Amino acid sequence: MERKVSIKDIARHLGVSTALVSYVLNNKAGRVSAEMAEKIRQAAAELHYRPNLIARSLQSGKTNTLGLIVADISNPFFSQIARIIEDEAKRSGYTVIFGSNDENVEKSQAILDAMLNRQVDALLIAPAEFTEPQLKALQEKHVPFVLIDRYFSDIQANCVRIDNYRAAYDAVEHLIKTGRSRIAMLAYDTGMQHIADRIGGYKDALRDNGIDFQASWLVRASYHHIEEEAATGMQQLLLPAPAVDAFFFATNSLAIQGIRQIMRMNIKVPDELAVISFDEADAFDFFYAPITYIRQSLDDIGRHAVRLALESIATSQPATPKEVIVDVRLIIRESTKNKTYATDQ
Amino acid sequence: MERKVSIKDIARHLGVSTALVSYVLNNKAGRVSAEMAEKIRQAAAELHYRPNLIARSLQSGKTNTLGLIVADISNPFFSQIARIIEDEAKRSGYTVIFGSNDENVEKSQAILDAMLNRQVDALLIAPAEFTEPQLKALQEKHVPFVLIDRYFSDIQANCVRIDNYRAAYDAVEHLIKTGRSRIAMLAYDTGMQHIADRIGGYKDALRDNGIDFQASWLVRASYHHIEEEAATGMQQLLLPAPAVDAFFFATNSLAIQGIRQIMRMNIKVPDELAVISFDEADAFDFFYAPITYIRQSLDDIGRHAVRLALESIATSQPATPKEVIVDVRLIIRESTKNKTYATDQ
DNA sequence: AAGTTCTGGTTAAACGTTTAAACAAGCAAA
DNA sequence: TTTGCTTGTTTAAACGTTTAACCAGAACTT
């Protein structure tokens, strides 16, 4: 990579001071003569000058960079959000660097450190479990950040999310209204609040509709072993014959694994088993009974997240955290079609 | 964001020079006394010192940052590669910033500029059409970069990719071997070499097997209007009754759209129409006739890309570009199952 | 005793910007 | 004629690092 041309080169080339060049190039040319300004601009163009943002950052203390931390950038849910964030950030002159924490505390800390060392102006974080201390530390350092998708009950912070309890509640109620009464749920084996809320909504919807929740209905799978654990958990509930008549999947990756199982066991959807999931996926459309799902507007999430981030960069004072709850919509399709002939027992 | 602690603070706190602190903290402590070193390390820990990588970059001329430019980071194909690249970069101490060019020349240039201004050490690029001049400009500036997935016949550059011609050829030959003779293809309406190669492989496979290619078999859709254009193109070929007995999709996003059409038209796969696609997708497994596809190892692509990038950063001399061709595998499934009863006409 | 070599540090410049403050010259007002 | 404002430009410091070069004192050589 060859020697880059700096403001100094322009200055030397024109026999003026670097200050003057800087003023002109930043349109702070309040008192610079028009001809001089023109000469400088021209020289800059001729020499193919490009500002060194690193130097600028050092001097200004701002990098115009946002750090995005998610569980796994290859998860479409996050990569779609990433895209929105990218676009939204760009229109304010910000660049995004990203990192995946793999739902792992140490990795999360490592990424955080790396981003802080790089002096990001703010962070957008879908936090992993047990990372509250890391977030508290950020707050102590007054590093602006916005939580997305995930949150902690004991952390007051900017946050963009949905009402998980309500969304789950409504989804389960939809299952009940369409004639299901033995409703299972597949969730991550985690204490994360958003999952807890989804489970809470599920249980309360059952209770409020006079169904009593059976502990065996709640199948849990750990993030790093979704496949095996979802498989065994679901098999216990569905083999030799389905002991439940509906399955509620807490996230789209759980749904993908869950539906794989259902296909493998050759269970008929929606007749033997209704299916509903959080989030979207192309795959949901390809299943013979297109999957009913809870749609979150990733657009809204991304946009609000960036907005909050930029706001808290601007008002560097620790303003009181803002929480944005974005709407969800239940997209109803074949997988939860009304039971026509009752197979109750 | 409060005042950060610098090396200077540590120095002051201990009454020593910043140089000493720097030496110790960088383990260049060749001639520093053991006690002094210990005191410095301790002070650094107490004061919660974290190196300002921006400052370090300014001084060293290296940012330890890679720029990743793809068409759209929300496309699973790219987001999966992004993840591999992230991990691979991290293990060498590099961070990744990303940008989506939306297959658009101006956006591509804008992102390139932003990344160069940020002094990335190297770029990983899945280039958009007509961006050869941008790449040539990079070469002139001796900015290290690696092309991934896409390439240009008239640009000699580091590149990690598959043998698109061969992969397409083999895929089409597979269709022929399983009894199809009227084989259509859905491709992007672009001159990009990787697509051209795929089309070339398709045509040659037909020719070499004594089938003559009908112009109407090649359906093209533009990137920004996949849905409509794929729909109308395919309808012409498939309604009222399929005029072809197989469809070859040039990418996974084309396949997703294409299969949506097939579902809508209620065409039976594989009996009425065999289907094969490039790349992977969860959705391929969920279709009632799981889709046969050409699998590229994204792992290999990501890994080699980072490796080449780091190598060309190291040997800053314009070494001769390296091209890495990664293997592909045809994953054969239901969608191309042998025709059992011939419906030839 | 004088020179040489270690040992353990310090000094100062540099990286490419920005920007407050100073300055020189011309001009207007007193 | 001094004083003071404008106008156009320069000076110099600062941002937080790194690192070559320097230096003082102690410890060896002769």
Image (cartoon, coloured by chain):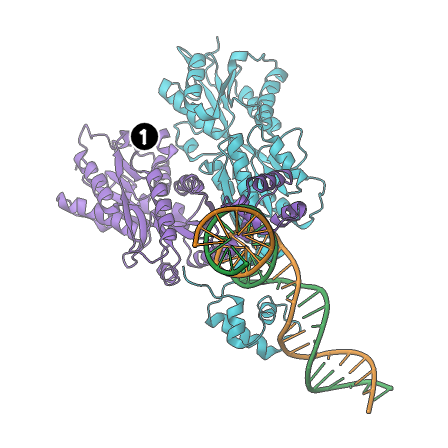
Chain colours: A purple, B cyan, C orange, D green
- What percent of the width, then of the height, locates residue B227? 41, 23
Q: Is residue A66 visible?
A: no
Give the percent coordinates (x, y) of residue A240: 29, 40
Is any atom of residue B239 visible in this view?
Answer: yes
Of B43 and B291, the residue lying toward us: B43
Residue A137 located left or right of residue A152: right
Above/below status of B324 relative to B277: below
- Name the side, left or right, on which B92 lies relative to A188: right
Indicate whether A166 appears above or below A332.
below
B38 shown above or below A285: below
On the rendered structure, is A180 left or right of D30? left
Which residue in the structure is indicated by mark 1? A290
Name the spot of residue B213 as percent of width and height, x first: 57, 13
Q: Identify the chain of the residue marked 1, using the numbered disc in the image.
A: A
Identify the residue at horizontal 65%, vertical 28% (top origin). Answer: B153
Q: Residue at x 30, y 58 (%)?
A: A155
The amino acid sitting under disc 1 is Pro
